[in-house]
Structure formats: structure tokens, C-alpha cells
Image (tube, rainbow, N blue to C red):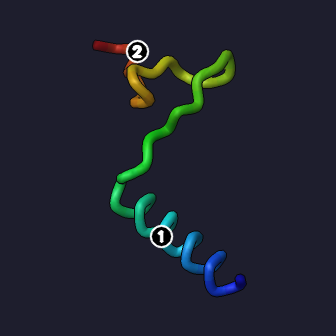
């Protein structure tokens, strides 16, 4: 079980380092996004 959890965390870390993850946080405290990608205020 520990090996499985370690594998999951390693895969997530690699995906994050390569930019394969998307920030899907949208809410009052966060900047607007377009399909999970940040939208700049100054277009």
C-alpha cells in the first residue's frame, strides 16, 4: 500500500513539473479563468 501511495505522489509531482495539470480553482478569491487557465486582466 505504501508503494502505491508513493507512486501516486511521484506521478503527480512529475505531471505538475511538466505542466500537465490544470488549475481549476474558480471562485471569489481567485482570478477569472478560461477552461482552467488564468486570464490576464490586461488583454
Along the viewing direction, whichever of 4 and 23 lies nearer the viewer: 4
Q: In the figure, is residue 39 to the left or right of 12? A: left
Tell me which numbered mark, 1 or 2, is placed earlier along the sequence. 1
Q: Position of residue 7 (x, y in %)?
A: 55, 78
**Location of residue 30 with respect to 11 vertically, above or below:** above
In terms of secondary structure, where does tag 1 sit? helix
Which residue is identified by label 2? Answer: 41
Along the viewing direction, whichever of 26 and 7 lies nearer the viewer: 7
Along the viewing direction, whichever of 38 and 5 lies nearer the viewer: 5
**Quadrant housing residue 43:** top left
Given the current orientation, which residue lies at the most extreme front position? 1
| Residue shown at the point (60%, 24%) measured from the top left | 30
Quadrant for the N terminus in the image: bottom right
Q: How many marks?
A: 2
Which residue is identified by label 1? Answer: 11
| Residue shown at the point (40%, 15%) measured from the top left | 41
Given the current orientation, which residue lies at the most extreme right position? 1
Q: Nearer the viewer, mark 1 or mark 2?
A: 1
| Residue shown at the point (67%, 16%) measured from the top left | 28
The label number, if any, that marks residue 20 in the structure image? none
Given the current orientation, which residue lies at the most extreme bottom position? 3
| Residue shown at the point (39%, 20%) measured from the top left | 34
| Label 1 crowd bin: few (<14), some (14–19), many (20+), radius 10 Å | few
**Location of residue 27 with respect to 6 vertically, above or below:** above
Q: Position of residue 24 (x, y in %)?
A: 52, 33
In terms of secondary structure, where does tag 2 sit? loop
**Location of residue 34 with respect to 1 vertically, above or below:** above
Q: Position of residue 27 (x, y in %)?
A: 64, 20
| Label 2 crowd bin: few (<14), some (14–19), many (20+), radius 10 Å | few
Q: Position of residue 26 (x, y in %)?
A: 58, 23
Amino acid at each position: 500500500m505504501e508503494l502505491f501511495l508513493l507512486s501516486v505522489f511521484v506521478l503527480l509531482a512529475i505531471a505538475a513539473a511538466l505542466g500537465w495539470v490544470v488549475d481549476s480553482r474558480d471562485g471569489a478569491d481567485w482570478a477569472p479563468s478560461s477552461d482552467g487557465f488564468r486570464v490576464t486582466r490586461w488583454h
